Image (cartoon, rainbow, N blue to C red):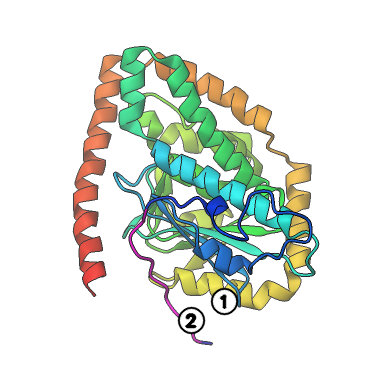
Amino acid sequence: MTYMQKKFGAPTLVTNSADMPGFADGAAPGQSLVPAHIEVASHRYDTLAVEVDPEARTYWCTMLPQGRGSFSPQMLQDMRGVQRSIKRMFTERAHEAQRPFDYFVVNSRVPGTFNLGGDLELFADKIRAGDREALRDYAYTCIKVVHTSHISFDVPVVTLALVQGDALGGGFECALSMDMIVAERSAKLGLPEIMFNLFPGMGAYSFLSRRLDAARAEKMILSGRIYSAEELHEMGIVDILADDGQGEEAVREYIDRHAYRHNAYRAVFQARKRVNPVTFDELRDITDVWVEAAMGLSESDLRRMARLTAAQDRRKVAQAAAMASLSAE
């Protein structure tokens, strides 16, 4: 089977779909709705590109960060917008025989990077200013995103993270919140927060302790070690290991091979979450611990955080050149 590699254009300004005929948030009973892939094609976000492949019945959400490749407040808001739109699409089409789509995939267009995690510059600024509430607001938005992903938007879809580069800190937490992780061999995943005397507080402990156990989750968190995709595949954290450059094909092949079993796979993932649930209350309580720990960081800890931020800036420059080259092709 031949798979077409899809490339997305540059992000554009958000378009309010409620201003378009047939796209109102509160569609009237019996109102004719356009096909899901056409509706999603009208959605525009600053930091995400979205599309539905109607043949594979898959919603692709591709991260297009404007800065360091981390979760900026804008990207978090865009992700919340995607999640709300998905919930609305299923609600509005509940009377239709076929669901809008069956699979959701999150990936990144940045070469060598899935996501580098939290906005470290924002963290340092808020900590130095003593602005506990602003730091908490950012963190709560993060856990709203990961928890909504974890429960598959409360709609009947299977979610996958396609990791084709580094997934660090919150980027790793984002991948862990999905039903499945597909990673290319050169991808690196880990939780480096211990380097600046902190811990990953937006889901890592909860998700890892379900996939492994509490002892191994703590060991991974406290080591700060960065793992290869192959190592995590052996541990059972990465579900599908793909050769470099073949990640998207691996996702499409998986969906093509298992589409007729979608109902069973989705049910198993639901059962997994029922047996070992990660509740929003749990995430919120751990996030509160994280906020207090963050506010206790010393100036030397913040300088170490700044060095990591500087390393991300250098990476950003190199990636910008790579993306410019990609766009020129």
How crowded pointer 1 is (Cα within 10 Å; few <14, some 14-19, many 20+) is rated as some
Q: Secondary structure at mark 1?
A: helix
Q: Is residue 177 left or right of residue 241?
A: right
Which circle marks residue 3 in the picture?
2
Magenta stretch in the rendered image: 2-12
How crowded pointer 2 is (Cα within 10 Å; few <14, some 14-19, many 20+) is rated as few
Q: Residue at x 55, y 57 (%)?
A: 20
The x, y position of residue 170, in whole percent, is: 45, 40
Q: Quadrant of residue 185?
A: bottom left
Is residue 221 visible to us here? yes
User: Which amino acid lies under the numbered mark 2 shown in the image of this protein?
Assistant: Tyr
Tag in front: 1 or 2 = 2
Q: Which residue is mark 1?
A: 253
Characterize the magenta stretch by its predominant secondary structure.
Answer: loop
Q: Height in image: 234 above or below 218?
A: below
Q: Height in image: 98 above or below 284?
A: below
User: Which amino acid lies under the numbered mark 1 shown in the image of this protein?
Assistant: Glu
Residue 120 within the magenta-colored segment of the rendering: no
